[in-house]
Every structure is written in C-alpha cells, then in structure tokens.
Image: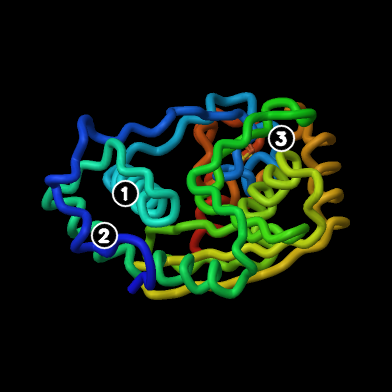
Amino acid sequence: MLGHGPTLSDLDSRDSRSQSVTMPDIHHERGPSSASRWLNCGGSLTYPQTEEAGPEALEGTRLHHVASEYLERVYHGNLSSFVVDEQTEKDLVILQPYYDFVERTINDLNDPEKYFELYCPPTDIPLFGGTVDVLLIDGDLAWVIDLKTGFKFVSAEDNEQLLCYTLLAKKRFPQLKQFRQSIVQPKVNYSATHSCTLEELDELEQRIRSNSKADFTPGAHCEYCPGLGDCPVADRNLVQIMSYAKS
Ligand code: SF4
C-alpha cells in the first residue's frame, strides 16, 4: 500500500467534485504506441494511424485514466474531477501493483519531480509526440514508467515504445543525461526495468528523422497495421507466419 497520502479508503465518492475524468484525445502520426511499426516501416504512415477500439483497448484507456487520477491525488493533492464508482473501485484494486511500483521508485530516488500523464508535444522532430504515463526526474536522471494493462508479457529491453517516451522526456527536459525505463503489468504482477544511454537516444532520433513514408518494409510489425489488406508489399501469409512465430 502507499505509505503516504490518501489510501483507497480515502477515495470516497463523497469527495467527487463534479464531472467524470476525460483525457485529452491527442494523437500524433509518429506516436510511441505504434513506434515498432512506423520505425520499421515508414510506409505504414501513409495509412491513417487509427487506434484499435476493441474492449481491451477501451479497458486499457479506462485503467490509465483511473491510474493517473489516483496518482495525481496521492502525490499532488489534486482532488478535482475524480468520480469513484463501483467500476473505479475494482480498477483501483487491479492497479495496486502499479501504485506500489511507483511508490517504491519514488522512495528510491531523492524527492524527484513527479509527472503523471505528461503530454509531450512535438518539438523539433515533426509529428513526434505523445503522453508519458509516469516521469520521475531526479537531477539529470529520468525514470519513465509505462503501465501495460494486458496479460501478454512486454520486455523493457530495446523496447522502441519506451525509448520513444524517453526521447520525448529528453526533448522536454534537455538537462537529462541518465535514463531508465520500466514497464509495469499489474494484471500479471510483473515489472521490468532497463536503462539506455544518451547515445542510444541520439540514434533513435536519427532513425525517426530518416523515417520515410516511401519505404515499405513488411515484417511482424504488419500485424496491427491499418494498411494491411491494402498495402502493396505485405504478404498476408508471411505476416501470419511471423505473428505465430512471435506468440
Ligand atoms: S502492412 Fe506492413 S509493409 Fe505494409 S504498410 Fe503496413 S507495416 Fe508496412
């Protein structure tokens, strides 16, 4: 449990001030969540980068909302616009391992700056922007924490999505020189942490800058591409084989 600030029992519906939480619906063409696709196939950007809206995606969005509102309340005393209903109570219990991880990480650092659902708009890299679940800053160290709400294990090592979040943090806070990234999957009680260097972020930035919409490169990343079925180069059989191979 969190050692300071409100606990679950403090999140009584009597505290609800007004309306439900609504998150900004900001989508960037080169967003971290689809980085593994567009970094490996710039041609995929010629198709609308629509997000899947199935039940799992909707649940993931809801859990992210609840998580950020709870952390805002605990660490920043932000009491506004958080309605605790029956569903929210269940979500808060699911998310407990995530809160515990965030708390441990904060306690391991030296009173870091804390940002939850931090929107990082595009800067000098066109169309590259996104929202970081948690960013902790301790001197020149940045620690990015990403919440995953699925059951499929996700590695933090060489994770292009996490690296993109880290690069966005670096763009927003240029003084940063050390970088750690964590993935937390509360439904399977799993977390993993990796680190990267400034040089690796520079390499990533060069990859993004050289990313061309004229290059079509098929691979496992085709699996969720919005262009699949219309794409001039993807071989459906190859995609299926590669999808099975990685599952
Ligand atoms: S289906 Fe594959 S090769 Fe075609 S645009 Fe999408 S990611 Fe690229």
Q: Earlier in the sequence, mark 1 or mark 3?
A: 3
Q: Report x, y in % for residue 198.
A: 84, 56
Look at mark 2 in the image and give the residue it sits on: 92
Mark 1, residue position: 66
- The amino acid pointed to by label 2 is Leu
The image shows residue 18 at horizontal and vertical percentages of 20, 31
Amino acid type indicated by mark 1: Val
Separation of residues labelled 1 and 2 (CA atoms): 7 Å
In the displayed structure, would residue 178 be above or below residue 133?
A: below
- Crowding at dot 1, Cα within 10 Å, few <14 / some 14-19 / many 20+, comes out as many
Query: 144 left or right of 101?
Result: right
* Residue 42, disc: 3
Q: Assess mark 1: CB under 8 A from ligand 1? A: no
Q: Nearer the viewer, residue 51 or 228?
A: 51
From the viewer's perspective, is residue 164 above or below residue 49? below
Q: Secondary structure at mark 3?
A: helix
Kindly report the distance in space between the C-alpha atoms of the residues bearing marks 1 and 3. 34 Å
Residue appearing at x 53%, y 45% in the figure: 236
Structural crowding at the residue carrying mark 3, measured as other residues with C-alpha within 10 Å and reported as few (<14), some (14–19) or many (≥20): many
Residue 44 vs residue 192, the one in the foreground: 192
Kindly check if marks 1 and 2 are in contact, taking CB atoms under 8 A apart as contact. yes
Residue 235 in sight from this viewpoint: no
Query: Residue 180's quadrant in the figure?
Result: bottom right
Residue drawn at x 22%, y 30% is 19
Which three-letter amino acid code belongs to the residue tagged 3? Gly
Q: Does the numbered disc 2 mark a residue whose Cβ is under 8 Å from ligand 1?
A: no
Percent from the top left, x then y, of residue 10?
21, 59
Residue situated in front as seen by the camera: 41 or 168: 168
Q: At 71% from the left edge and 39% from the top edge, which residue is drawn?
A: 172
Q: Does dot 2 land on a helix, a strand or a loop?
A: helix
Mark 2 or 3, which is nearer the eye? 2
